[in-house]
Amino acid sequence: MALTVLSVVLAVVLYGSLLWTGRQGLRDPSDRMLRAVFLCLLCAGLSFPFGVPAGARLMDGLTGDGAAKLAQNLCLLGTVHFLGCFFIHAASNPATATARVRRQTVPLVATAAVITLAMALTPGVERSHTYATADMQEPGVAVFYLMAGAYLSYALTIALVWTVRYTRLAGRPLVAGLRMLTAALAGMVLASVVREAATLVRLLGGEVPHPVIVGAKLALDLAIPLFVTGVVWPGLVTRWASIRVWWHHGRVYRELALLWTELHAAFPEDALERTRSDRWWDGLTPRSVHRRYYRRVIECRDGLVRISPHLALMADTKVPLEPEVAAIHLRTALRAYAAGEEAPSQAVPVALPDGDGGLEDDVRQLTRMSQALAASRA
C-alpha cells in the first residue's frame, strides 16, 4: 500500500512538473537548460507506465513480449542523458556545451541500437522475464542488461560529476535541489554498478547473494523519488513563492474593500479601466489577482489625495494624518466634499508609509486605515 501511494504521489509530481516545464519551454524555446529538463522529465514520464505491471502487460499485449521492458530502458537512457545535458549547458558556454552534448549523444544512440537488436534476437519466452528471473546465459539477455547497465552507470556518473560541479556555482533555491540530485545520483550509480556486477556474476554462472540484490533495489527505490524531487524542487519553491504572493495580494485586496468602497463612491471617475470577463475562473488567476490588487491600491491612494484637504479641515491639523485619525474623519470629509464645501486646493499627506519600504509600506498604511474604518463603523 505504501509503495502504491508513493507511486501515485511520484506520478502526480512528475507529470505536474512535466506540464509546468513544457509550458515554460513554449514561452522560451531558446532556453536549452529548460529544454533539457523538459526532455528529462518527458523520458521519465514515458518510462513510468512501462514499469507498472498493468502498463507492461498492455504494452506487451499490443506489440509483443519484451516491448515494455525495451521501451522503459530506452526512456531511462534518455532520462539520464538529458539530465547530463542540463548540467553541461548550465556549466559551459553555448559553443562548448553544444559540442559536449553531441559527443554524449553518440554512446546514447549506440547503446539504444544495441539493446534494441539484443531484444529482437532474444527468444520470445525470455523477453518477458524480469531482471531477477532472466537467464543471463542467453546471449541476447546478457547483452541487453550489460549494455543498458553500462550506459546507465556511465551516464549517471557523468551527471553526478556535473551536478557536484554545478552545485558549487548555484544559489538558493537551486542548490537544495542539486543536493537532492547529488544524493539521488550517488544512490543510482551505486545501484547501477552493483547490478552490472551482479549481471556479470550471473553470466559467468555464479550466484549473487540475495542481500546484495535487495540492497541495490532499496538504493534505487529511495533514489528515484529523491531524484524527481530534486529535479522539480526549484520549480516547486518558485511556485510556492508565487502562491504566497497571490494569497497575500488577494487578502489585501479584500482588506482594502471598505476604504475603496467609500472613496470610489465619491470619486467614481478615478476608477482605472476595467475589462470584464465572462469566465468566472479568470478572477482567480494570478495575473487577475495581481492586477486587481494594484488597481485597488492605486485607486485608494488617488482617492485619499483628492479628499485630503477636507480631511485636514475635519481633523483641524496640517501634520501628516495617521491612518487611524484619517479613518475617524473620512466619512465626514466625504460628506463635506459631496456638499461642495470649500477646502484648500493643496493636498495633505495622509497615511504615509513609515519607512522606505516602497509599495509594501504604502499598502500597509492603507490597510491600517481600512481596518480602522471598519472598527469605527462597528
Image (tube, rainbow, N blue to C red):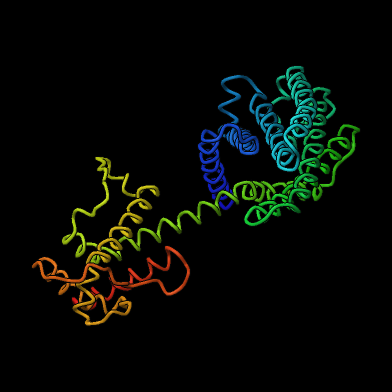
Residue drawn where x is 56% and y is 43% of the image = 14
- Asked if one can make out residue 359 in the rendered structure from this viewpoint, the answer is yes
- The answer to whether 12 is drawn above or below residue 68 in the figure is below
Image quadrant in which the C terminus is located: bottom left
Q: How many marks?
A: 0
Q: Position of residue 311 (x, y in %)?
A: 22, 74
Horizontal side of 72 relative to 2 (left or right) equals right
- Seen at 73% across and 17% down, the residue is 120
Q: Position of residue 360 (x, y in %)?
A: 43, 65
Nearer-the-camera pick, 7 or 269: 269
Question: In the image, 333: left or right of 2?
Answer: left
Is residue 281 depicted above or below 78 in this figure? below
Q: Residue furthest left?
A: 339
The answer to which of 351 and 82 lies nearer the viewer is 351
Q: Residue furthest front?
A: 345
Q: 370 or 160, which is in the foreground?
A: 370
x, y percentage for residue 163? 75, 47
169 up-or-down from 155: above or below: below
Q: Would you say residue 51 is visible in this rendering?
A: no
